[in-house]
Every structure is written in structure tokens, then in C-alpha cells.
């Protein structure tokens, strides 16, 4: 699907984030010479059309004091992984949870859940809550701690 000139301008105006003001859509609209309602409607249509996947907050966990961030990885029974993954994703402290294919024999894990804590002990307590939820459906697990922020950016239009 080709982008209109307005779509490109809208993406360019929002690709580094919405303005941190009380009425961000109105602020973007003012930059583009349209109303905030037109901005909301077009972004909603772009979501419906699949041009953009989501509009959401991207917190910098380190700045919020969450310095022990761990990707917990789980080897979960394939027959139960989708249902259990939904439950894990709903736990407080899990920012995102998803299923990926295993790469045996080196990588037996098929469920990933990112948890954040102010200490490794806090992350390990959250991992224990996940382990308890998964129960006998879980054969193995590990925690991979973040050592750096590699990406905190959304959609970017390629410069022409």
C-alpha cells in the first residue's frame, strides 16, 4: 500500500514519539495544518489497514529505576504454550510475552517473557511466579539479563 503525502508527513511527525503535552494529537495536527481529530482518525485507519501495528508508550526502564531486566525463556509443552503464554503475558511485571520456534539441540525454549525489576532478586521472584504458573508444562527455563539498551525506537521512514 502506497503512502500518501499526508501519511508520510504524519509518520515523520510522530516517528520519534508523540509530543509530551496534554493534547498530543492536537499538537501534531497543528504541525501538519489539520485538526487533532483528523490526526486520530488517520492513525486509527492506518492501524486498521496494518500500515502501523500499534501506538503505545515505550518506557525507558533504566530511567525508571528498573535496572535488572531479564528475558525469561521457557521450554513449555507445545499443546499448552499458547494458553499459558496468554496467562504469563497478563502477569504484572511482564512487559511482553511471545512464542518462538525452538532451535534444538542448542535452544529448547519456545516461550519468552520479558520482566523488569529494580534488582536481580526482584526479577528472580517474578520468574518464580511464572515457573509456578507454568507448572508441569515447563521442562526448562533460564533468565537472560540485559546488559545494554540496543533499541528504543519505533517506525522510521527512510530518507529519500
Image (cartoon, rainbow, N blue to C red):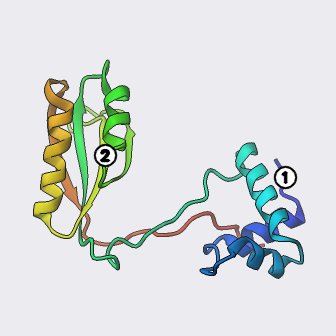
The residue depicted at 75 percent of the width and 79 percent of the height is 27
Residue 19, position in %: x, y? 64, 79
How far across and down, in percent of the image, does residue 15 sit? 65, 70
Q: How far from the left and from the top, in percent, is residue 127? A: 17, 48
For residue 14, which quarter of the picture?
bottom right
On residue 91, which mark appears? 2
User: Residue most toward the front?
Assistant: 22
Residue at the image point whose x is 15% and y is 61% from the top: 122
For mark 2, give the secondary structure.
loop
Q: Which mark is residue 2?
A: 1
Image quarter in which the C terminus is found:
bottom right
Asked whether, in this view, residue 90 is left or right of residue 15, the answer is left
Left or right: 105 in relation to 50: left
Q: Position of residue 143 (x, y in %)?
A: 18, 52
Up-down relation of residue 26 to residue 38 (above or below): below
Q: Decide which of 38, 61 is in the foreground and name it.
A: 38
Q: Which mark is residue 20?
A: none
Q: Earlier in the sequence, mark 1 or mark 2?
A: 1
Which residue lies at the image location 25% right of the left edge and 70% below the top edge? 147
Assess whether mark 2 and mark 1 are in contact (beta carbons under 8 angstroms). no
Q: Residue at x 18, y 58 (%)?
A: 123
- Quadrant of the image occupied by residue 41: bottom right
Residue 28 vertical placement versus 142 (above, below): below
- Figure check: 22 above or below 78: below
Relative horizontal placement of residue 48, taking residue 130 as reference (left or right): right
For discs 1 and 2, the disc positioned in front in the rendered view: 2
Foreground residue among 74 and 105? 74
Amino acid at each position: 500500500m502506497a503512502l500518501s503525502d499526508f501519511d508520510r508527513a504524519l509518520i515523520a511527525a510522530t516517528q520519534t514519539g508523540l509530543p509530551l503535552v496534554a493534547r498530543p494529537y492536537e499538537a501534531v495536527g497543528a504541525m501538519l495544518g489539520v485538526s487533532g481529530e483528523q490526526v486520530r482518525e488517520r492513525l486509527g485507519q492506518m492501524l486498521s489497514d496494518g500500515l502501523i501495528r500499534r501506538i503505545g508508550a515505550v518506557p525507558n526502564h533504566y530511567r525508571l529505576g528498573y535496572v535488572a531486566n531479564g528475558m525469561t525463556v521457557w521450554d513449555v509443552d507445545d499443546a499448552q504454550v499458547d494458553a499459558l503464554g496468554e496467562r504469563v503475558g497478563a502477569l504484572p511485571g511482564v512487559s511482553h510475552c511471545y512464542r518462538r520456534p525452538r532451535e534444538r539441540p542448542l535452544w529448547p525454549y519456545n516461550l519468552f517473557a520479558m520482566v523488569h525489576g529494580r534488582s536481580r532478586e526482584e526479577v528472580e521472584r517474578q520468574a518464580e511466579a511464572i515457573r509456578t504458573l507454568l507448572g508441569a508444562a515447563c521442562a526448562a527455563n533460564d533468565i537472560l539479563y540485559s546488559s545494554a539498551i540496543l533499541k528504543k525506537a519505533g517506525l522510521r521512514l527512510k530518507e529519500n
